[in-house]
Amino acid sequence: MKRDHERSVTVTVRTEGGHSLTCSALMERDPNYLHWNRMSLLGDEKAMLSAMRLSGKGLVQWRLLSRNVPGLEAYTNDEFGSAIMRTVGRASGVNISHDSIQKIAAMELIELNEQVENREFDFPLGVTYGFLQRPSDWHVYSRAWSKRSNLTQRGPWRKVRDAGLRFRLLQVGEIQSDLRRSVEHEFIQIPGVEIPPVKTWEDPDQFFEAASELWFSLRIGITFWHRQLTCTLHERRTSKNSLCNIWHSEALEPRRTRARRERSQVLGECDKFLQSLSVTCHGLTDWKEQLHAAAFGYASSFENLTSEAALTRCVEGIECLLVAFEERHGFERKLVSSGRWRKTAGQLKKVIAEEGWEEEISSLAKRFVSSVPTMSLETRIQRMAQHFASRRKRQIPDLFDGIDRMINERNKIVHGRKIQDFQLLYVETMRARSIFEQLFLDFLGARRDVRLSSEARMAILQHSASEKA
């Protein structure tokens, strides 16, 4: 880990169009970041004019120039990545020479790759991911602390046989230096996941691609379990003759604390849940993005400051999950086919034309009847719940009986109508979260590894009793 806050380098910056600039630069690290996150280009007025051609082109690619060190010719050390040009310009004036060297541009580093190769290396094939933001309840279940380092804790291995991989949870300690604080060195715990192979991979690139797919599946589960977005901070890739560290630009955030009412209703061991989810997601490549969007909608409901936003975000997550379910199992949302409805819509348009309405109203009415009738959101949720209940020979939870009230409260918010009962709004938010948890676990076949609390059901019963009183 880099503790310095500045580093002088020589860099080549290039756009996709082929324009490039080679100059001196200053890599900088903000104390809120664990690695380099900015780069300032240095040069004269001519270099500044060249840097202007780099601006406004989207992402630019950069690579550090390094000299060969005598006696270490067998090593190949490369540092490169991507960045965004934020500002271009330099100070000018009567007393400033045109060929004076100063800062001419500022870049925000998006990705930084550090790659070392040597034929004498003999690293095992594997990849380790560290991520932010850090969950307050990230626990690595292990019998003992790692013998390798007293700053790192590793959990038990979990196999994903179909993918030819296994994983375990990590908690890696880092020492952060920050001169702004009275305590200069701060101990920071970074959560992560280690993924090695369980079979022989002839091509390391194929292994890294499979590990990336597994990591995406794990991110879906982590987002759901810990109710917050998971952003990759660091990737450490090892193969027989090379070591590669990939850093992503993510600011360090404090551990988040949650109120008692926002604790998860999903109980169990996180790594066992992630194993079940990974096995199922291995065959759901086409729907992973949809599942990630669904989990993010659910997690976002815990981050919103208002109850209105919490309910709408959670219902959005349910709708994303419904789309993935319907596409996977071949269910249609349309009540009739487009071909059959087209004939009926034509007849309805003739009736509208004969009514003699104004042109604007007639046009809107014709557009309305052109749309094929579709299932209501309530019916789609009930269909998904019934599908998994019938497969597993169990009853649908009674919290699904009040879906119409949940949807009605959500529609009031979306269409700008006044909320009359804020206690009901809170209860329906809890219902939406519980419904999402039920359907999400059923879809991924992970319910056997967890259990759901009855807090949402009790809140609904208490509110119903207060209404009757």
Image: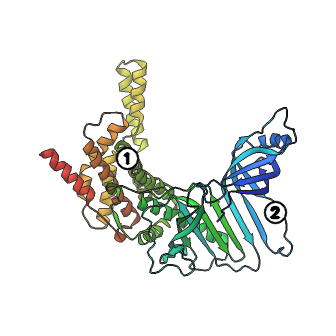
Q: Which residue is mark 2?
A: 66
The local secondary structure at tag 2 comes to loop
| Kind of residue at badge 2 | Ser
Is residue 336 shown to the viewer in this render?
no
What residue sits 74% from the left and 62% below the top? 79
* Residue for point 86% across, 41% down: 46
Relative placement, left or right, of 238 versus 43 is left
Instruction: Judge by depth and name the residue closer to the eye, 248 or 93.
Output: 93
Relative vertical location of residue 317 with respect to residue 150 in this rendering, above or below: above
What residue is shown with label 1?
A: 310
Q: Position of residue 335 (x, y in %)?
A: 35, 45
Q: Is residue 433 left or right of residue 228?
A: left
Q: Nearer the viewer, mark 1 or mark 2?
A: 2
Mark 1–mark 2 distance (CA, rounded to whole Å): 51 Å
Q: Specify the label residue 82 is tagged with.
A: none
Q: Is residue 146 above or below residue 388?
A: below
Q: Secondary structure at mark 1?
A: helix
The quarter holding residue 340 reads top left
Number of marks: 2
The kind of residue on which mark 1 rests is Ala
Where is residue 350 shown, x and y percent of the image? Answer: 38, 26
Q: Earlier in the sequence, mark 1 or mark 2?
A: 2
Quadrant in which the N terminus appears: bottom right
